[in-house]
Amino acid sequence: MSSLYQLEALQQEIANHPEQWRPLVFTNGCFDLIHAGHVRYLQTAKALGKTLIVGLNSDSSVAQIKPYSPGMPSRPIIPQQERAEVLAALKPVDGVVIFEQTTATFLLETLKPEIYVKGGDYTPDTLPEYPTVQAYGGQIELVQVEIPSSTTSIIQRILGKQPELKNL
């Protein structure tokens, strides 16, 4: 079932075969350079329901979320189609949908997943999608990050701007 979807096609697929999709888990992000922290996060998210859909920020929305800073390359590093292909190939991921907005609010309103997952570095107060999920009766799970790695820290390490990554 792991595949790339346009939102309308995904919405129709879920509506036509709810028994194959629900309970639906949803998460979203840039997923610019996939690392072990991402993989473990996605495995944990998938375990919360039947299927996992990943909303992938488009190149233009990543550029808005991760603006250029001196000494750092512009983001994203990897183009959206390639990021989507890598995500779709990961075992826990049942579908990927690319979106243009800086938040996943519209996707959540459209798909109404039973469970919305974000990293434990968020709180309900800092999660822009929180009111939307609450409004339709969904559940929010904040997953603790097992491996404290980030694309930014990986880039900084490559550029020699950060000390060695710690062995975990």
Image (cartoon, rainbow, N blue to C red):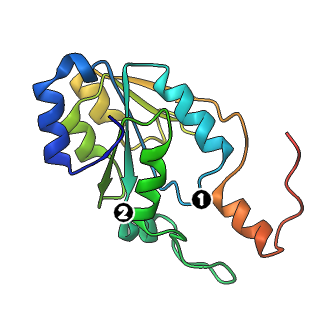
Amino acid type, label 1: Leu
x, y percent for residue 99: 30, 56
Which residue sits at x=16%, y=34%? 13
| Disc number for residue 132 | none
Residue toward you, 89 or 64: 89
Q: In this view of the protein, can residue 120 be seen by the observer?
A: no
Quarter of the image where the C terminus is located = top right
x, y percent for residue 35: 65, 50
Front tag of 2 and 1: 1
Amino acid type, label 2: Ser
Mark 2 or mark 1: name the one nearer the start of the chain. Answer: 1
| 85 shown above or below 59 | above
Quarter of the image where the N terminus is located = top left
Q: Which residue in the protein does label 1 denote? A: 33
Which residue sits at x=50%, y=69%? 76
Residue toward you, 72 or 46: 46
Q: In this view of the protein, can residue 60 be seen by the observer?
A: yes
- Circle 2 residues within 10 Å: few <14, some 14–19, many ≥20: many
Which residue sits at x=53%, y=35%? 42
Q: Which residue in the protein does label 2 denote? A: 58
Distance from Cα at disc 2 to Cα at disc 1: 14 Å
| 121 shown above or below 155 | above
